[in-house]
Image (cartoon, rainbow, N blue to C red):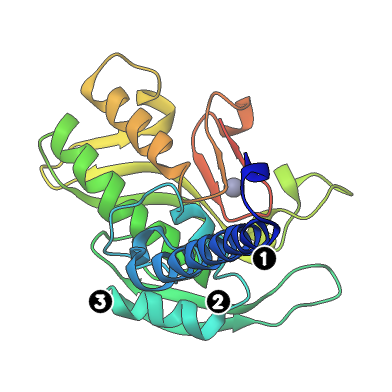
Amino acid sequence: MLERFSPRLRRALVIAGIVFRFVLFFGGLGFAVWFAVVWFPDAYNPFVPPDIRDEPNIVTGLKLRGLADEYDICVSVVRASGTKYRRDSIASDSEGCGMPQGLTLEQSRISYGGGIQLTCPATAALLMWERHVVAPAAAEHLGSEVARVRHYGTYACRNVNNEKGGRRSGHARGDAIDISGFDLADGRRITVLDDWDGDTPEGRFLAAVHEGACGLFSTVLGPDYNDLHANHFHFEMARWGICR
Ligand SMILES: [Zn+2]
């Protein structure tokens, strides 16, 4: 079609075409940068630290794991949620144990029967789980609030399943908590051992809080994983993920 025009006009049209594409490309790029930096909501931006008060979404797990090497940022995330905590550290030793940048969670919305030692990202995940998973699941399935979470421990210098010569557990880094049950404000008590897998309000509550932990912690294990977890959930901030 360009053959109909004079060589000069053809050249001008080709140059105009190049300029047009150039403008389109950089205009689009500029728009993308503007969208990412200015407009994109913080809750969906994986480069912005999580806010424990925000409803979890598809990038929350990524944000929580991103706190692993950002101790000061992580502590400010926990502080912003209004939780009582103190900085706590256990020196790393040659045995592969230690929690150099951890916290002791002293008081949150739910009691753990005393302070618990966890790494900061695991604490942040636990706080989100309390607020956005446990509280609504208790209201929906049980009609009562959870007053206390029962657990078998957090930091512990030991191997996976306590096996001799095995690899170190997430507990040996303070990245994991073993949750065994829940005490309700109305006096009822729910245990993973007795109430898991039941077609009851208690069973549905346990299924909901197990499933809801999966988007927050990277590793979530329960009675369906193996017999060693028949009486507790293992929640862990790990590099790899599994939810069973
Ligand atoms: Zn465990």
Q: Which label number is shown at residue 139?
A: none
The CB of the residue at mark 1 lies under 8 Å from ligand 1? no
The residue that mark 1 highlights is 173
Q: Amino acid at mark 1?
A: Arg
Question: In front here: 87 or 159?
Answer: 87
Q: CA distance from mark 1 to mark 2?
A: 9 Å
Is 107 positioned to the left or the right of 119 in the image? Answer: left
Q: Between disc 3 and disc 1, whose residue precedes?
A: 3
Mark 1: secondary structure: helix
Residue at the location (44% across, 59% down)? 125
Q: Which label number is shown at residue 82?
A: 3
Q: Amino acid at mark 2?
A: Gly
- Decide if residue 102 is in sight here: yes
Question: In front here: 147 or 39?
Answer: 39
Residue at the location (14% across, 39% down)? 139
Query: Residue 71 occupies which quadrant of the picture?
Result: bottom right
Residue at the location (33% across, 65% down)? 52
Q: Amino acid at mark 3?
A: Gly
Mark toward the viewer: 3 or 2: 3
